[in-house]
Image (tube, rainbow, N blue to C red):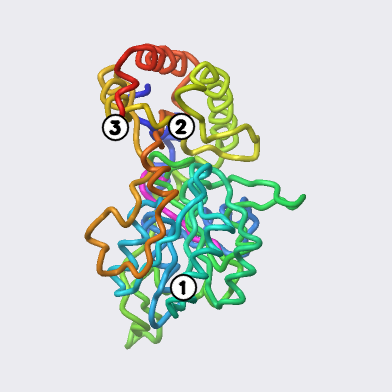
Amino acid sequence: MINSYGTQDLRYIDSRIFQKIKNNRIVTNGNYCKLFERKISKLVKARYAVACNNGTSAIMMSILALNKKNIIAILPNINFVASANIISLLKGKIILCDVNKNTGMVDFVSFKKILNICKKKKIKPNIFIPIHYGGDVLDLEKINNLCRINKIDIIEDGCHSFNSSKIFNKKKVIVGNCKYSKLTTFSFHGVKNITTLEGGAITTNNKKIYERLQLLKSHSLKKTKINDPYMMISPTLNFRMCELSALIGIEQLKTINKFKVKRDELVKYYLKKLIVFSDFLLPLNFNQKSIFWHLFTIQLNNKTNKSLLMKFLKKENIATQIHYKPIYKHSVYKKYILINDCKNSNNFYRQQLTLPLHTLMNKKDVNYIVSKLKNFFYSKKSINVK
């Protein structure tokens, strides 16, 4: 099953969960949501977790919970549109930071550079939303030190990297434990590491932020008294998760280690088989058991026509995707962008390609993909320059 770069795996869902919902009086934001939240916070070792209806809502709630008057947010240029959309809707401003050409993520060097540009232009950012890309984990310790000095709050976008961890300077960092941030957001969309069909979550160690999130997820309505049922704190939206989604999430957590091992095995097999294409491509992923790989991405050499390759693979029923188009290339954001640093982001975008990776795949699927890559790269089609 490789006609999608990613897909949900619901094979282990206990069908009796529908009976539980049928007999449940509360069908949204109830006890199963609370149980799911407790399980998330325990897994990532954060004090608090709040479930919501999708990963985009998680980002919006996190930004609102920080209660900034004038939002000036630093975002990676290689990015999904969700964060930029929210900043724009909230009438904020965007600073686009370049990424490391080898990881697709903002690193200390690129972040320090963007802060220097901000200082020269007398711009004071107050939020940074880095992405843990593809399942990998970004080293945030030194970046966090800079953020504290400059009064910038970090919201980690962990939508790719639920249940990923990595060792930095002999210290284990778990995505979601908020060791170097105020909040971390997650997505449980169908293609992510686990799914609730649609859904998301936020983790934090800050009690005040947690209490704000609890209000934000349900129109910011605070209960008062029986003859005056609620008081509006601030205008927001309905971000609640339904009980069925939470139950599916609880079931997915039971098999999360199976999913992680399976993806790791597929990544290792990909790496082994793709060695023969070293003249044409370089896999971005690498071997590390603690990483829960969401994407398998490659970087093509400058001579390969990526568009032709994608069309060729599509004809062979192999889905590919690009993660992501630099934010500044979406003209709709032009009036919100204050700074655009993009050299590495442009190169990364030009060369990056995502191949299928999900738990319904097997080694035969990888072999098939490799055989078609061989057909392409050893034909004259592959060397047509873009």
In the drawing, what numbered circle is on residue 298? 2
Up-down relation of residue 326 to residue 226 (above or below) = above
Q: Distance between the residues labelled 2 and 3?
A: 17 Å
Q: Quadrant of the C terminus?
A: top left
SS class, disc 1:
helix
- Mark 3: amino acid: Lys
- At 65% from the left and 35% from the top, the residue drawn is 289
- Mark 1: amino acid: Cys
Residue 39: x, y in percent? 58, 52
Residue 201 drawn in magenta? yes
Q: To which residue does mark 3 refer?
A: 386
Question: Disc 2 or 3, which lies upstream in sequence?
Answer: 2
In the rendered image, which quarter is residue 26 located in?
Answer: bottom left
Nearest to viewer (mark 1 / mark 2): 1
Taking 86 as reference, is 148 left or right? right
Up-down relation of residue 120 to residue 332 (above or below) = below
Q: To which residue does mark 1 refer?
A: 118
Taking 132 as reference, is 225 left or right? left
Up-down relation of residue 85 to residue 12 (above or below) = below
Task: Between residue 333 and residue 249, name the one nearer to us.
Answer: 333
Residue 247: x, y in percent? 45, 47
SS class, disc 2:
strand
Taking 230 as reference, is 142 left or right? right
Q: What stretch is highlighted in magenta?
A: 196-203
Residue 16: x, y in percent? 43, 37
Question: Disc 1 or 2, which lies upstream in sequence?
Answer: 1
- Mark 2: amino acid: Ile
**Dot 3, how many residues are within 10 Å of its Cα: few (below 14), some (14-19), or many (20+)?**
few
